[in-house]
Every structure is written in C-alpha cells, then in structure tokens.
Amino acid sequence: MTKQIIPFSCDDISALAKSLRKQLQSCDSFPSHVDMLNILAKAAGYANYQDLRQATEATGAAAEREQLEIAIPGKLKPFMTQDYMLRAWPVKRAIQDLSLWFFWCRFQYQQAYGESEVNEVIKGFLGFADFALIRRELCNHKLLKRTDDGRHYWRAAAKPPAELHLLADVWPGKENCA
C-alpha cells in the first residue's frame, strides 16, 4: 500500500496543546494510532482525520489543476500539446531529456508511488502508448528514484534546465533542488 503524506499545521500552537491535553485526558486508555490521528485532526480544527484528509486532497487537486503555467520551449512544441501532453517521443536526445522534466514535475516530493501509480501519472500526460519508456528514462536520468525491487518510486531532488526552472516549484518540498 502506498503511503500518502498528509501535511499537518496549525496557526496557534498553544491552542493545539490545550486541545490535545483536553482530549488525551478524556481517554480511558492510551489512544491507538487511529485515535491519535483523530485527536490531532480535531486539535487542528477538523471534525476528524478523514475531514483533514479530504481537505488536504481538495487543496492538492486544486493546486494540481493550476500548477503549470510554463511556456513550452520551442524545441518541444512539435512534440507537446498546449496542455503539456507529449504527442510523440522526439528522436534527438537533447529534446527527449527536456521533455522528461514535464513528467518529473507531475510527481510530488516526499510521496512514494507504486509502479502502477507511476504508470498512471505518466499515461495522463502521454499521447502514445509507451509509458514504460518514459518511466525507464525518468529513472535512467535520476529524476525518479526507485527501490531495487522496483516496488516503490519517488521524485528525486533535481534542478531543471534554465528554461524550465519554474518546474522545480510545481510540487515544492524541503529539498527542492539538488
């Protein structure tokens, strides 16, 4: 099962501490993992953990829809649609390398993906059938890293080329650029 990272923050740490203390005092026994998730979510102002999770997913979906406002380099225009779908795999290696950055930015930092999830992300922006080629090239270029058994993938910290430097900010993380 893929682990989904759900960010947690609060505006007032004092109010958080008070709420946590009150909720923990009302527990008859030491809270389970699920109980702790609900306690933390309630302390942050959500009804429960599921409410926090839905709010995070809604925010993420909105950010994903609005994330790319980057000009497609002239070299890539014959191969890419205006909505960043790669229509065909370029023959020239330099153009292939450039196109991989548009796939790299579709993966969120600090999130593990299974192979099928990686394939689905790639398929969503690919106008031809060879998603395995793109996955392999992302790994070969060290833009995606994976475990030795190939079960888990994650976005590598990397610095896009100068003309695509804005792609580094699409899914910001602690270590955005290497």
Image: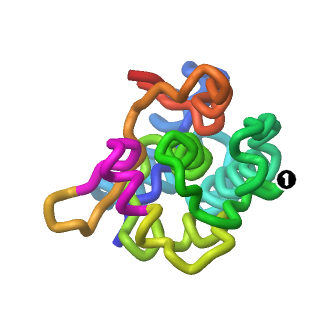
Give percent across and percent down for residue 13.
56, 21
Q: Can I make out residue 87 in this image? A: yes
Residue at figure coordinates x 33%, y 42% from the top left = 142
Give percent across and percent down for residue 57.
66, 57
Residue at figure coordinates x 72%, y 61% from the top left = 85
For residue 127, side relative to residue 96 (left or right)? right
Q: Is residue 39 magenta?
A: no
Q: Is residue 176 above or below residue 109?
A: above
**Label 1 is placed on what type of residue?**
Gln
Which residue range is magenta in the image?
Answer: 135-146
Give percent across and percent down for residue 41.
57, 48
Indicate the quadrant containing the C terminus: top left, top right, bottom left or bottom right: top left
Observer-nearest residue: 144 or 108? 144
Q: Is residue 70 above or below residue 148?
A: above
Q: Mark 1 packing: few (<14 Cα in 10 Å), some, or many (20+)?
A: few
Q: Is residue 105 above or below residue 131?
A: above
Q: Please, which residue is most extreme toward the front here?
A: 92
Q: Please, which residue is most extreme toward the left here?
A: 148
Q: Is residue 38 above or below residue 16?
A: below
Give percent across and percent down for residue 121.
56, 65
Residue at figure coordinates x 70%, y 66% from the top left = 87
Q: Name the residue tied to disc 1.
A: 82
Observer-nearest residue: 129 or 53? 129
